[in-house]
Image: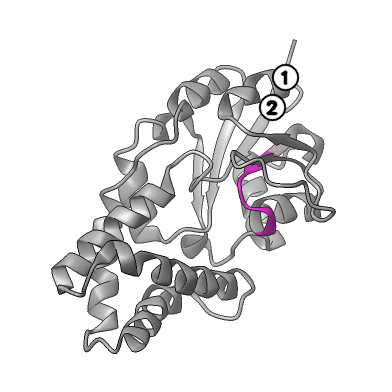
Amino acid sequence: MSPRYPWLIFDADNTLYDFDAAERNAFVELMRSLRAGNPEELYPLYQNINHAVWHDFEAGRINADEVKVLRFRRLFEQLELDADADAASKHYLSFLGRHNELLEGAREIVERLSRRHRLLLLTNGLTRVQRARFGSSEIAPFFEHIIISEEVGAVKPQAAIFDIAFARMGHPAKKDVLMIGDKLSSDIAGGQNYGLDTVWYNPGRLPLPARPRPTYTISALRELPALVD
């Protein structure tokens, strides 16, 4: 019997990869190299700035190149730190590209699903970071396609990036494709608006929103095989 969803589209960061750990580690390395105070104390401030910058990016108000530098420019302004935001961005991306830690159980689940499903990775990440991470990742061989927003000039939740994904997949029926991700505003809203069933990966067991409302919700990756098969 064929699976209900022959194609599975996965988000990458904080769905399969432990991006929180990677981001924290890269930030600590950067700030230590700049000798800019206690990195652990400064990290929450960076997170707030970074989230706001990425929100603007996903809304189409700024581009990927601006994301890379703007977050550090704003951070250094708040810290009154005399540092080059462009140089800091390059060092940070280099540090970040070295970290490809997976979430617990991610490799086993991806390998298992790849036996009956075709897999595509769809990320809003930056090319320099994601290519470095995926290139050395143990789950990369299980994916037929990896689509990075910076490379294709479109971001989730925009329909354009899903158009590109469907072209890579050979234009399957939308009912045969499932979108899996942790972020409501990009993964779930994007998939839902495109006419796909969606899985919200919600390990924190946050309340289910009215909109966007995912088709399914899971709190652990091990729940996926039973759901899609």
Residue at image x 68%, y 18%? 226
Residue, x 29% and y 39% (percent of image)?
Answer: 136
Classify mark 2: residues with Cα within 10 Å, few (<14), some (14-19) or many (20+): some
| Quadrant where the C terminus is found in the figure | top right
Q: Nearer the viewer, residue 42 or 3?
A: 42
What is the number of the mark on residue 6? Answer: 2
Q: Looking at the rendering, which quadrant does residue 56 occupy?
A: bottom right
Residue under the point 71% across and 55% down: 190
How are the colours assigned in the image? one colour
Name the side, left or right, on which 155 lies relative to 84: right
> Element type at marker 1?
loop
State yes or no: residue 182 in magenta. yes
Q: Which residue is mark 1?
A: 3
Q: Residue 171, relative to residue 117: is it above or below?
A: below
* Start-end of magenta stretch: 179-185
Question: How many neighbours does mark 1 have within 10 angstroms: few (below 14), some (14-19), or many (20 or more)?
Answer: few
User: Which amino acid type is marked by label 2?
Assistant: Pro
Q: For numbered disc 2, what is the local secondary structure?
A: loop
How many angstroms separate mark 1 from mark 2 (CA)?
6 Å
In front of the other: 178 or 171: 178
Disc 1 + disc 2, Cβ < 8 Å? yes
Where residue 63 sits in the image (x, y, percent)? 50, 76
* Quarter residue 36 falls in: bottom left
Q: Is residue 159 left or right of residue 137?
A: right
Residue farthest to the right?
A: 210
Q: Position of residue 55 (x, y in %)?
A: 58, 70
Quadrant in which the N terminus is drawn:
top right
